[in-house]
Amino acid sequence: MRIASLDATTLEACLSAAVAAPSFFNSQPWRYRLDPDTVTLEVRAAPERSLRHADPVGRALHLSVGASVFNLRVAALHFGWSPVVRLLPRPEDPGLLAMVRMTAPVHRNAGKFRADLYPAVWRRHSSRMPFSDRPVPPAVRAELAEAAHTEGALLTFPEHTETVRLLRVAAEAEHRSRTDTERGMESRRWLHPDEEAAADIGLPAAALGPQDAREQIPMRDFTAQRHPERLPAQAFETTPVIALLTTEHDRRTDWLRAGESLEHVLLVATANGLCASLLHQPMEWPDLRLDLNPAPDHTGHAQMLIRLGYGPQGPATPRRAPHLVSEPWTTP
């Protein structure tokens, strides 16, 4: 018996949700291919859109793809399918990072996620703007931690002293990246002027955001040059809320699950009216990434620092159209 097909409109909506996921430098390092016979979407890496200096082992690429897979799951449930995910399904094919097979659910949304995560997919984007000092309620923090736990990761909210230490590590990483010639050149290649409306990857200048006047929060300077006229200094929150996402192990599957966890957290945050930005800089330096792990035992593996708060949403970054990231299925 042939499995029900995935109609073109639903497929396009699912792929649009997938590419709405956050990615390192908005590189969107993914491709998709549908097997119509099994209603299975293959999710492949697009290595030509990786960053050789900032992400030499592809960890950030895997996180990006994992976030995309999570959005696929949310969209599939929204349209009445139950997604079954296999990560790294073929060891002999390392570019195939995931397979998402659509099956019929017991009932709509299957009670697995909040019903408002699908609309949150379209509202979520990184905000590098200053947040207010309004505290994030304990119940919301607990829900965010549970979202990460559901996907196999741990999300913690360090106390003030530890938050200061983590931000200091991130500031050191930002300084290193800004003074590294090769990384600076690589970073600037992903920037494009605002007038380049046709650009569908990378970062428009308007998305860069301001810099913290007190330099308490190390917002990334994508120009790697700190031009005051391009990155105006502003007063950011005095008590930043920082969350640390970690995994028990540090394999490719853990990176993908960390990406799913990250997007689950970000969508729940969006549904709760929170904004977020990602402090990825220390993940790009092995010694500093190790320093992020909770003291004193330094167990686990840091995957992302997330800044959360209430404030203005930053501008949305461009996305590639679904037909540009999908490939036709060919029978072997």
Image: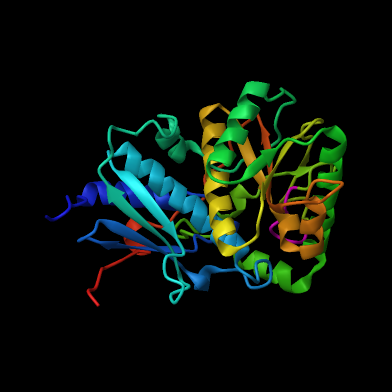
Residue at (54, 60) in percent of width and height: 253
Give the image location of residue 218, x and y in percent: 78, 48
Q: Quadrant of the N terminus?
A: bottom left
- Of the pair 98 and 32, the residue shown nearer to us: 98
Give the image location of residue 203, x and y in percent: 57, 56
- Left or right side of 25 for 44: left
For this orientation, the residue located farthest to the left is 1
Residue 191 in view of the camera: no
Give the image location of residue 274, x and y in percent: 60, 30
Q: Main secondary structure of the magenta part?
A: loop
- Left or right side of 19 for 279: right
Residue at (22, 74) in percent of width and height: 331
The magenta segment? 219-225
Residue 54 in view of the camera: yes
Q: Quadrant of the C terminus?
A: bottom left
The relative height of residue 105 versus residue 26 in the rendered view (above or below) is above
The relative height of residue 261 versus residue 1 in the rendered view (above or below) is above
